[in-house]
C-alpha cells in the first residue's frame, strides 16, 4: 500500500492515541478522515495537521445515524478506488469493583469498545473491499493481563482481540488484512483524569461496599496511574499504526510500548504465581484475610 493519496479513517481521534495517529498519518501523506464527537476537536485537528490532508468526521461510534453519514461522506470522497485503511481506536475505560458496577455502565463499556467497533467495521467494509484496504484494531495488553477493578475494560479488550482474530480469517480471501495492536502503558490525557475519577467511583458505591473496597481500589489506582504516567507517549502507538498500514507483510499482532513485552511474558506465568504477582503489585489483601469468621 502506498502512502500517496491513501485514504484512512481513524475513530476516536479527538485526543490521545487517536489524535496522535490521525496527525502521524496525515503527515505521512494519508488523507485522514478523523472521527470526533465535537466540532471543536475536529477544527483543532485540522489546524494541527497543517498542510496534511485531514477531514474531520462527526462520529459517535454508538450512533447509527452518525455512522451512516460518515460512511456516505467517505464514499463520496474515495469513489471507486475505495478505502485504504480503517483504524478502530474509539474506546472508553471503566474501573470499579465488579460486585458494584451497574449493568448499564458495563453495557456502555461494551457499546463503545466492542459493538461500536463492529458497527464501524461493517459500515466501511464495502469501501475497504474495493481497495483492498487494511483494518488496524487498537486493543490492549489488558486483554492478556486483567487487573483488579479493571475487569470491565479487560473483558471488552479481550472481546476486541477475539473479533480481530476472527475478522482476519474471514476477510483474508479479499486480501483485507486485519492487524491487532496491543499497547501497554501509554501516557495520555485520560491518565490525568483518572485521579479525579477515583473519588467519584468510590462516592457512587453503597456505603457497605465502599467500606469493603475503598482501600484496595485506591491502592490499585495509585499503582496503575504511576505505571501509565511512566508509559510511552501516544506517538509510539501512532508509529505502530503506520507500520501496520504500510508494511508489505504486517504481523497479525503488535505489542506496543516499552513495557509491553515484559507484561506479555508475565501474563504467561502459571495462574497461582500470576495471581500472587498481581496481589503484590496492586497491594491487595492476602487471600482469606478479610473472610467472615
Image (cartoon, helix red, strand yellow):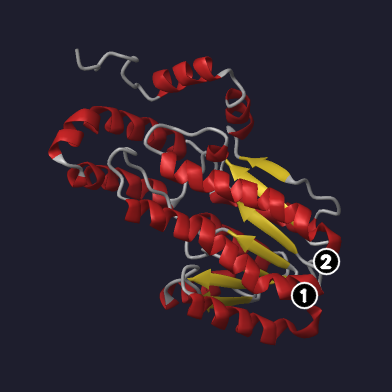
Task: Please name the residue that numbered disc 2 is placed on.
Answer: 2
Task: Please name the residue that numbered disc 1 is placed on.
Answer: 5
Look at the numbered disc 2 and give the secondary structure of its residue: loop
Residue 249 in percent (x, y) is at 85, 50
Residue 91 appears in view: no
Front residue of 77/242: it is: 77
Residue 206 in percent (x, y) is at 16, 41
Residue shown at 39%/37% (left/top)?
Answer: 225
Structural crowding at the residue carrying mark 1, measured as other residues with C-alpha within 10 Å and reported as few (<14), some (14–19) or many (≥20): few
Q: Quadrant of the C terminus?
A: top left
Residue shown at 60%/27% (left/top)?
Answer: 262
Residue shown at 67%/65% (left/top)?
Answer: 86
Contact? badges 1 and 2 (CB < 8 Å): yes
Q: Quadrant of the N terminus?
A: bottom right
Residue 170 appears in view: yes
- Mark on residue 188? none
Residue 92 in percent (x, y) is at 44, 54
Q: CA distance from mark 1 to mark 2?
A: 8 Å
> For residue 292, what is the image quadrant?
top left
Residue 138, compared with residue 67, is above or below; it is: above
Look at the numbered disc 1 and give the secondary structure of its residue: loop
> For residue 253, what is the image quadrant?
top right
Structural crowding at the residue carrying mark 2, measured as other residues with C-alpha within 10 Å and reported as few (<14), some (14–19) or many (≥20): few
Looking at the image, which residue sits at the far left? 207
Amino acid at each position: 500500500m502506498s502512502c500517496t493519496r491513501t485514504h484512512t479513517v481513524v475513530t476516536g481521534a479527538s485526543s490521545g492515541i487517536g489524535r496522535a495517529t490521525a496527525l502521524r498519518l496525515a503527515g505521512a501523506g494519508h488523507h485522514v478522515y478523523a472521527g470526533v464527537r465535537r466540532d471543536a476537536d475536529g477544527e483543532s485537528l485540522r489546524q494541527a495537521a497543517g498542510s496534511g490532508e485531514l477531514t474531520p468526521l462527526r462520529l459517535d461510534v454508538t450512533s447509527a445515524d452518525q455512522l451512516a453519514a460518515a460512511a456516505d461522506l467517505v464514499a463520496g470522497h474515495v469513489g471507486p478506488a475505495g478505502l485504504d485503511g480503517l483504524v478502530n481506536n474509539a474506546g472508553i475505560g471503566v474501573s470499579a469493583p465488579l460486585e458494584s458496577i451497574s449493568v448499564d455502565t458495563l453495557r456502555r463499556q461494551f457499546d463503545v469498545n466492542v459493538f461500536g467497533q463492529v458497527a464501524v467495521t461493517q459500515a466501511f467494509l464495502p469501501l475497504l473491499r474495493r481497495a483492498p484496504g487494511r483494518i488496524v484494531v487498537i486493543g490492549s495488553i489488558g486483554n492478556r493481563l486483567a487487573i483488579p477493578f479493571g475487569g470491565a475494560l479487560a473483558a471488552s479488550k479481550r472481546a476486541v482481540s477475539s473479533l480481530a482474530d476472527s475478522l482476519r480469517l474471514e476477510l483474508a480471501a479479499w486480501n483485507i488484512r486485519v492487524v491487532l495492536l496491543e499497547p501497554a502503558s501509554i501516557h495520555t490525557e485520560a491518565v490525568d483524569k483518572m485521579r479525579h475519577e477515583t473519588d467519584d467511583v468510590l462516592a457512587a458505591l453503597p456505603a457497605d461496599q465502599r467500606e469493603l473496597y475503598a482501600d484496595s481500589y485506591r491502592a490499585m489506582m495509585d499503582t496503575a496511574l504511576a505505571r501509565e504516567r511512566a508509559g510511552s507517549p501516544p506517538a509510539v502507538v501512532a508509529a505502530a499504526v503506520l507500520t501496520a498500514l504500510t508494511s508489505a507483510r504486517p504481523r497479525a499482532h503488535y505489542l506496543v510500548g516499552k513495557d509491553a513485552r515484559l507484561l506479555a511474558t508475565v501474563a504467561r506465568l502459571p495462574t497461582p504465581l500470576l495471581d500472587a504477582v498481581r496481589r503484590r503489585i496492586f497491594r491487595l489483601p492476602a487471600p482469606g484475610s478479610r473472610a467472615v469468621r
